[in-house]
Amino acid sequence: MSRSVNPSGRPSVVIVGAGPRGTGLIERIAANAPELYGDAPLDLHLVDPHPPGGGRIWRAGQSPLLWMNSTAEDVTMFTDETVELDGPVRPGPSLAEWARGVRSGEIPAGPGPADGAAALGPRDFAGRRLQSAYLSWVYEQSVAALPPRVAVHEHRRTAVRVSGSREGRQQVWLAGRPAPLLADLVVLALGHLEAELPPEQRKLADFAARHGLTHLPPAFTADTDLSALRPGEPVLVRGFGLAFVDLMVLLTEGRGGSYTTGADGQLTYRPSGREPVLHVGSRRGVPYHAKIGYELHGERPPLPRFFGPEQVDALLARPGADLDFRRDIWPLIDKELGFAHYHRLFTAHPGCTRMNWPDFEEKYAAADPGGAALQALVGAAVPDPADRLDLAALDHPLAGLRYPDGASLQEGLRGYIEADLARRHDPAHSPDLAVFLALLSVYGQLVRIGDRGPWWHGFFSYLASGPPGPRLRQLLALSRAGVVRFLGAGMTVTADERRGVFRAESASVPGESTEARALVEARLPEPTVAHTRDALLRALYADGAATTRTGLLAVSAADGRVLDRSGRPHPRRFALGPHTDARSGGAFARPRTNAPAFRQNDATARALLTFLRDRAAPPVTTLPVRRAPVTEESHAADQ
C-alpha cells in the first residue's frame, strides 16, 4: 500500500501553484503567523512543475524580447498602508526599487538579475526575465520570513487530484507519484491554464487538419510553437491585445528583424526576410490603448465615490437578486468613471469647463447614471464634445467608419494609433489617467460581487492594461514595412471548403476579404473550469465544486474557500486566481492602490492559520527544520 507523504503528522498546507499568487500567499502567511500561529510547527508544500516565484507565466526561460506592460515603479509584490487588510503591512521594494538595490549592492542577486537591473529606470518596461528574477527574490524573502519551525517543501510536479472528506485531511495526488501529499488544507493558486477547444475552434482545427493548414488556437503566446508560420506567407491573426503584441515581437525581432530610428525620430523596421505577413483584426479592430506615459500631478479624484463599499453592499443585499451586469452594475461604474474624468477636468483643466466644480459635483451626484439630466449637465458644463467622456465611443472606436479599400484602412489606422500614442503621453489629457485610476478602484470593488463575465475584463484590459508606447511605435513601423496589415473591426473568419483556405472579412472594408492558409487566435483561453485541461480542476468540478454562469470556480468572497453547488464553503479547500470568480486582475499590483489580490491573500492566509490553530490535530512529533526550502528530490519523506 502506498503511504502518504507526511509521516511526521505535523500540520500541513499544500499550495498548488508556485507563481506570483502562491508566492504572495506565502508572504502573507509569514506576515500573519506570529499573531495567529505563534511558533508551532507547520509544513508548507508548494507544488508546481516550474520554479517558484515566477511560475510558468513569469519563468526565466522565455524570450528576452518579451516585456512587461507596466513600468518598473508600478509593480510590487508588497503591501502598503492603502491595502485594507486585517494582517500587518509588510512593506517591500517595488520592481524599480529592487533593481536600484541590486545595482547599489544593497540587495544581493546573481549575475543574471544584476545584468538586467543595471539599466532599468522607474519608468522603463522591464523584460519578463527580469521580473522573474524579482519574483524569485520575493519568494526567497517570504520563505526566510516564516517562523523557524515552518518548513517549505518544493515539489516540481503537477497536482492532478484532491481527495478527502470535508471533515478529514486532504490527499493531493501528484503526477508520477503513487503516494499523495497529506494536507490539513489545500490552496489552488493555479494561474492561467490551458483549455479544451470550444466548438468554433474545434471546427476550425478540423478544417485545418483536412486541408493541411495551420491553426493555432488561443494560448499563452510564449508557449506556442510558431515554427509552422512560414516566411512571407499571409497569416490571419484574430485578436489585437497583449497576446498579439507578443506574437508580433516573436515573429519579427524574434526572427532577426531590427529597428532603426531616423533623424525625424520615426522608427523604421528592417526585415530579415524570415517574417510572415500578419493580417490582424478583432472586434474593435484597433490595438489596446497604450500605457499612459506621464504621472498625475495635483489633486487625485477622491475614489471610490459612486461605486464603493456602500453601493456594493446595497447590490449584494437585494433579496433574491440575480444581478445583471449591464442593468444593475454598469450604470454605477459609468458614473464612477465619469466622476473621475470630470473631477480631473475641472480641477486641472478649468479652461475646458463653464461651471465651477462644487456646482457641477452637486448636480452630477443628484443625476441618475446615464440619464438625460446627467447628459444635459455635461453638455452645459463641458462645451467641447472632445472633452467629454464617452465610454461607448471608446469601446467601439471604428463604429460606423467605412473605408473604400484596404490601403485606406492602413492609413486610417496608422493615424488612429499615432493619435493614441500622442494623447497617452500628453498631460493635457490627464483626465484619461484619472479614468485609469477609477478603473483600478472599480476592479477592486467588483471582486466582492464575483464573476461578471468576459466583457468587463476585456473592456478593462483595453483601456487600462495595454502595451507600452514603444510597442505601438514598433507596430507602426511594421505596418509601414508591410509586415503587419490591419483588417479592421468586426473581424470574422470563415473556412472556405472549396478553396481550402481561411477567409477573413471585416465591417471596416465592406466587400473585401483576405485569404490565408494560417490562422492564429491571439488571446488566452477563457478560464472555464468545465473545459480546462487541468486535471485537478476538472476532478474538483466533477466532485461537486460550483461554477458561475461563465464557468469560473465559485469561491467565498470572504476568504477564498471553494463553494459546492449548494453554496457551502469547503472548510479545507481554497482557491485564488483567474480560474475563480474572485479573480482580481493580477497577482502583483501598482503600489498604493489597495490591490484586491493582496487583500485576498491576506484573508486566505489568516483563514488558513486560524483553522490550523483552532481545529487541526496537535502534531505527533516535531522534526528539525531546515530554513531553506526543501525540494522533493532531497526531502527524505518523499523518497
Image (spheres, rainbow, N blue to C red):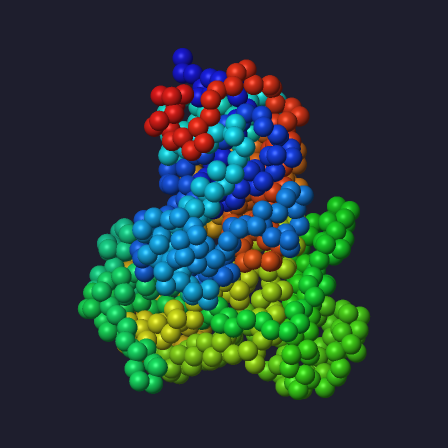
Q: Position of residue 536 (x, y in %)?
A: 46, 34
The residue lying at 49 percent from left, 35 percent from top is 15
Given residues 625 and 217, the one toward you in this image is 625
For this orientation, the residue located farthest to the top is 1
Given residues 246 and 529, the one toward you in this image is 246
**Vertical position of residue 146 compared to residue 207: above or below:** above
Q: Position of residue 200 (x, y in %)?
A: 41, 53
**The C terminus sits in image quarter:** top left
Given residues 362 and 479, the one toward you in this image is 362
Left or right: residue 258 compared with residue 443: left
The residue lying at 69 percent from left, 61 percent from top is 304
Left or right: residue 366 compared with residue 133: right
**Vertical position of residue 91 compared to residue 236: above or below:** above
Left or right: residue 460 compared with residue 262: right
Q: Position of residue 30 (x, y in %)?
A: 55, 38
The residue lying at 64 percent from left, 27 percent from top is 613
